[in-house]
């Protein structure tokens, strides 16, 4: 199975900060990586797919990059509504379609 | 409008059986995979398995193989997740999600979640 390691697992930041979350795969997954945002009590929401393609309706302050084994999600200027938990997911090889452990972004 | 609507919360005792549902609408139900994801209290997302309602092709995560059964009834655009004998450790929120699968893959629409509580 492909393992995904997200870092950091917890991040404290202020409104307006630039935030970067990393997702490392245990083996190459090309660009088959998606990022999701989950707020408490809500279902996950797709932000980015194919490592760097912004899902329709998602603000442009979100961006993704990477291929192979190392990927990043960047929020260029953190907004109050961005405080949430973020997950990466590999969709290269299944089963299983592994998720990363999550990164919780909290207000500083 | 694409929607996945899941069945309501359940409270069960250990050893009981359970089948929860996920009804798709607003798209061709037989043309997209439907996956199931577990989220235990305060924990992250775990991918359980996936089904293609068009031909019922089903794949399970090794962690869930033999523990649950995924099925679908394409005549009513509904996917199911079932247990034959629940354990306390099955207490979790369960989400269904539609997988777009072409040159790229992603889960683009999610159900609202079904909370399953297993307690004696």
Image (cartoon, rainbow, N blue to C red):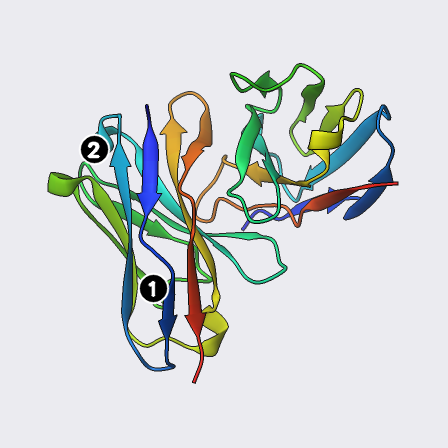
Q: Where B105 sits versus B39, above or below?
A: above
Location of mark 2 (residue): B30
- Percent of width and height locating residue B2: 33, 27
- Depth check: B54 or B85 in front? B85
Residue placed most toward the observer, B82 or B104: B82
Report, in whole angstroms, how far the alpha carbon at label 1 lies from the one at label 2. Answer: 22 Å
The percent position of residue B29, horizontal first and vertical second, equals 23, 32
Q: What element carries label 2?
A: helix
Q: Mark 1 points at which residue?
A: B68
Residue sitting at x 47%, y 77%: B88
Using the image, name the chain to which the residue with label 1 belongs.
B
Query: Which quarter of the rendered picture does the N terminus of chain B lie within?
Result: top left
A104 versus B62 height, above or below: above
Tell which residue pokes out farthest to the left in this image.
B75
Within 10 Å of disc 2 (Cα), the crowding (few <14, some 14-19, many 20+) is some
Query: Against B84, is A102 above or below?
Result: above
Which residue is drawn at the image coordinates 72% and 17% (left, top)? A61
Q: Which of B45 and A31 is in front in this view?
A: B45
Q: Which of the pair A4/A26 is nearer the observer?
A: A4
Label 2: chain letter: B
Sequence-wise, the earlier of marks 1 and 2 is 2
Q: Indicate left or right for A92 with B114 as reference.
A: right
Q: Residues within 10 Å of mark 1 (few under 14, many from 20)?
A: some
- The residue drawn where x is 62% and y is 42% is A39
Name the quarter where the C terminus of chain B is drawn. Answer: bottom left
Counting from the top left corner in percent of width and height, residue A50 is at 55, 23
């Amino acid at each position: 199975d492909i393992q995904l390691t997200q870092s950091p697992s917890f991040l404290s930041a202020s409104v307006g900060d630039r935030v970067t979350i990393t997702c490392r795969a245990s083996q190459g997954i090309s660009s088959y990586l998606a990022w999701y945002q989950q707020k408490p009590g809500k279902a996950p929401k797709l932000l980015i797919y194919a490592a760097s393609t912004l899902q329709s309706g998602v603000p442009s302050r979100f961006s993704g990059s990477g291929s192979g084994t190392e990927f990043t999600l960047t929020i260029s200027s953190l907004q109050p509504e961005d405080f949430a938990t973020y997950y990466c997911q590999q969709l290269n090889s299944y089963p299983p379609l592994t998720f990363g452990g999550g990164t919780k972004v909290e207000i500083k | 409008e694409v929607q996945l609507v899941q069945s309501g919360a359940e409270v069960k005792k250990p050893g009981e059986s359970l089948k929860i549902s996920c009804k798709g609408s607003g798209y061709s139900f037989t043309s997209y995979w439907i996956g199931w994801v577990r989220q235990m209290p305060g924990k992250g997302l775990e991918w359980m398995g996936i089904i293609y309602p068009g031909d019922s092709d089903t794949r399970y995560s090794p962690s869930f193989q033999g523990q649950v059964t995924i099925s679908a009834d394409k005549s009513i655009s509904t996917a199911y997740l079932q247990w034959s004998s629940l354990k306390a450790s099955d207490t979790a929120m369960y989400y269904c999600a539609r997988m777009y699968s072409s040159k790229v893959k992603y889960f683009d629409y999610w159900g609202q979640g079904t909370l399953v509580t297993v307690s004696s």
